[in-house]
Amino acid sequence: MTTDVTRLPSGSGIRPTDPPPIPRRSVFERLPTPSLVLGIVVLLVVSGSTGPLQTTFMESLQIMTGHVVPGMPWMTDGSLTVSQDQAVWSFRVPRALLAGIAGASLALAGALLQANVRNPLAEPYILGVSAGAGVGAVVALVAGSTAVAGIGLNASAFAGAAAATALVYLLAKQDGVIAPSRLILAGVALGSLLAAITNFLTITTDVQNVYSVLFFLLGSVSAASYPQLLLPGLALLAVSVFALLRSRALNAFLAGDETATALGVNVESMRRTLLLATALLTATTVAVCGGIGFVGLVVPHAARILVGSDHRRMLPVSIFGGALFLMVTDLLARTVAQPAEIPLGILTATVGAPFFLWLMRSNGAVRGGIK
């Protein structure tokens, strides 16, 4: 039985000409980027207050504010100790910041790569950059000399990632043109070869080196320091500015090469630049944090579900969403199995794989570009 809206009583408040009610949107749906930024700030303070040395949320906030704002007397009341200050500012804060930078970089790299090859299943490590960094790091660890320790390990990993990027570029280029399909195939093939080299070096090295190799390959920010933030932070800033300025060209890429060319986009130059930007983000991240998967695959899809495929809105959500995701993951990595620490790659796969499977079967998969 249907209701005739023309005969509804006058006191019902409903008229046939009234538009359908618009569902009220949450604050996050209306302001996704500011909401994510607020979440990152809160999580940074929470990370600073979490650890073996007991520190409250307000104490962590007080310590951070005292260091950020010059001249603020953060210890005048005598309630905070030097040990608390060192634990929060020297160890926990740089760790959380590095996790945020790494998550933002990987998410942005995934979004750019998916636009570049027009494949929603593409992610940064498909280029073989991570495998190249793994070979460089393992070579440094196996060598075991003081010349390659510390920053030498990061430099060796970055050199391996850069070499892998150059090889993928040469293999994917044919007649001066980079084909998306060749780019993916070259990355997969080279990544498999480099992974085999890494495994060979791992099983032939001394036993005491195996744990260090595996921990690096699975990803960690436990040894973070402020100097380590410089290179990945600058890379993230530069690529973010470039991507946001070229967001309209990225939107044109979604319609295909011919349409993008008709809209005035230099497709080959843009594709080459996107490849270099993706490789730079991935290389600088892997060189410092090791291999962390699934961030560049899941976060851009989640961003598309929340705000759509327009890169002008999707890219900021991907950047800040990736930072928030990996900061939460790192917080779990050092608290779930205390006093032991879980490598980040294990947790991102544990969280990311089920989420992506759910995403494929949900209605949001259409907006995410999977269906």
Image: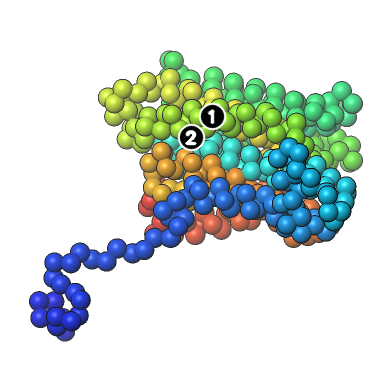
Q: From where the camera sits, is residue 33 visible?
A: yes
**Pointers 1 and 2 in contact (C-beta within 8 Å):** yes
Residue displayed at 42% across by 29% down:
246
Q: Name, please, the residue furthest toward the left.
A: 6
Is residue 11 or residue 35 the one in the foreground?
11
Residue 53, by quadrant, is bottom right
Q: Quadrant of residue 252?
A: top left
Which mark, by number, is residue 158? none
The percent coordinates of residue 329 (x first, y second) are: 66, 52
Three-letter code for the amino acid on which mark 1 is drawn: Val
Q: Residue under circle 1?
A: 239
Amino acid type, callout 2: Leu
Q: Residue 193 placed where, x, y %?
A: 65, 31
* Element type where label 2 sits in the image: helix
Say whether disc 1 or disc 2 marks the residue closer to the N-terminus.
Answer: 2
Residue at 43% x, 55% y: name it: 29
Question: Which residue position holds label 2?
Answer: 112
Task: Measuring from the top left, give residue 224's x and y in whole percent.
Answer: 76, 39
How far separated are the C-alphas under marks 1 and 2?
Answer: 10 Å
